[in-house]
Image (cartoon, helix red, strand yellow):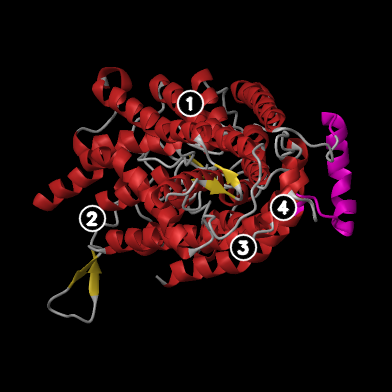
Amino acid sequence: MTEAILVFALAIGLGWPLGRYLAAVMRGDPMLRLDRASGWIERPLYRLLGTDPAHGMSWRGYAKAFALSNLVVGGLVWVLFMTQGWLPLNPDAIPNMRWDTALHTMVSFLTNTNQQHYSGQAQLSYLSQMVGIVGLQVITPMMGLALVVATLRALMGGRQAMAPGRDPATTAGSEADVGNYWADVIRASVRFMLPLCLLWSVLLTSQGVPSTLGAGPTATPVDASVEMKQQKIPLGPVAPMVAAKQLGTNGGGWYGPNSAVPLENPTPLSNLLEMLAIILIPVAVAFMVGPFTGRKKLTALVFGSMLLMSVVSTGAGVLIEGHSAMAADHAAMDHAVMDPAVMEGKEVRFGVDSSALWATLTTQTSNGSVNAMHDSLAPLSGLVTLGNMLINAIWGGIGCGLQQFLVYLLLAVFLAGLMTGRTPELFGRKIEAPEVRLLSLLILLQPAVVLGFTALTLALPQFTANSNPGFHGVSQVFYEYTSAYANNGSGFEGLGDATYWWNLTCTLVLALGRYPALIVPLAVAASLARKRHAPEGPGSLHIETPTFALTVIAVIVILTLLQFMPALVLGPVAEHLSLAAH
């Protein structure tokens, strides 16, 4: 647990100043030296896009700009993957990617998911990795951040109401100015994400992570047979991609086995740096809320709730996975012997605790990277990772996690208002039937999509080729669709998922898990912003309290249990009971 405490301490210690800096960036505060330095990059981009960063947008204009940017960037990357064999920066002569695999890969990285139905070192050229993969890994997290920042502006009444000395009541009835989408994405990318990626890339390179444009060398294995005398060692600019994948809650590795590969994660320090990067920016986003909105106690609510859920999840995951890891030697109680069964799928150099810690952190966020195979986790450890992804708001993805938390927050306000006999309202604006209908549809979309595709896949094995029978087979299929919908990307990799069925169905699930979850809360917040603002008084529901934080957590847990308990019982719980019986 020492490593877990260190990771959390570093994330909190670094996340607090990063969150305050991020709030200043997203507010567009004057930063004289930084404005001059970044202006060389930002101003040409604004001219190219034909936008004025000072010109605000309505929520519809913001959502349309978000959709347009995704369509254009996604189309270009899809073509790149399907033509990479004819393009430069392909020293290993990797062929073009099949259209359905290219489509799934493009949508996966466009949705900040990085679910991989391919092996990167064997199926993507350097150009595809550097431009398509890393490019999306940098920009798509900032798109999610932009959407949640726009939602926070709307909840506060829009940029007009957030101006110093402005009365929020004066914005009632008008369309809220939620900011400029292009400016939000560009500022966050240039002033925040890229500098952090550069720093982490240098740190990882110092630990031996490859960073080269040369072709990989060949080597003669010590156990080489007559048929295979030499082996190609795939290299490339790995360090920059690993930095972007970890910091951006992306998770897609340069190599197929991800950060379990020594080239991608060679040392204990690189392992610590990569685990820290998983939660660093989500923690910073939680710290950003108070300074950005001007409600300091709101940070305490968001961060405190997320931290409590994270600590419980992490403790459960590490405890469950390590429960049978040490078998006491009754002949000599001064030492213990590692159980080989528990070490299946884990790197000996990391061990059980570090592997379990990574598994919980990567599913508490929408990162999805691994340093051990989740398919080999104990069944109840798999249950913890599934629960993290079903909640999707413990830390969540950059922006997306906070956006999902706001959905639960709004529902908790509505329920708390009903229970106390008061009109549900948030920040002086009433939450009424139209908003609750939208939020309810969003909550119901997840079980409809995840459970629907899981049932269909299990019912039609002749078409879907799910690869394992029994309870574990149920867990594999359920995990794949849960991971896709949560925009996480990790998987139970015993599943044979490089097929037309998996590529096309997961593509649909990826999109349904990303776009409604970002746009619907923005629409709800904009609807609230148009309503008459009533000053908060003694009769108002005060959300920035420990009691309300526990109410939000209770709503999250109840909704998750009610919707998914049957599937969890048929999968990991039944598998655990079956193993215990034998």
Q: Quadrant of residue 328?
A: bottom left
Magenta extent: 25-51
Comes first in the chain, label 4 or label 2: 4
Query: In terms of sequence position, does the residue under pointer 1 or pointer 3 come before the other?
Result: 3
Which class describes the residues within 10 Å of circle 3: few (<14), some (14-19), or many (20+)?
many
Using the numbered discs, state the Cα–Cα distance from disc 4 to disc 1 in whole angstroms: 29 Å
Taking the magenta stretch, the answer to whether it contains residue 33 is yes
In the picture of the structure, the residue carrying the numbered disc 3 is 15
Q: How many marks?
A: 4
Amino acid type at circle 3 is: Gly
Which quadrant would the N terminus be assigned to in this image? Answer: bottom left
In this rendering, which labeled residue sits more in front, label 1 or label 2? Answer: 1
Q: Nearer the viewer, residue 57 or 173?
A: 173
Q: CA distance from mark 2 to mark 3?
A: 37 Å
Q: Residues within 10 Å of mark 2 (few under 14, many from 20)?
A: few
Q: Which residue is mark 4?
A: 192
Horizontal relation, residue 149 to residue 53: left or right = left
Q: Residue at x 38, y 58 (%)?
A: 313
Q: Which residue is mark 1?
A: 507
Q: Gap between marks 1 and 2, in whole Å?
A: 34 Å
Residue type highlighted by circle 1? Thr
**Tag 4: amino acid:** Phe
Q: Give the distance between the C-alpha atoms of the residues marked 4 and 2, in whole angstroms.
A: 43 Å
Of discs 4 and 2, which sits in the foreground? 4
**On residue 341, which mark appears?**
2
Q: Nearer the viewer, residue 284 or 161?
A: 161
Mark 3: secondary structure: helix
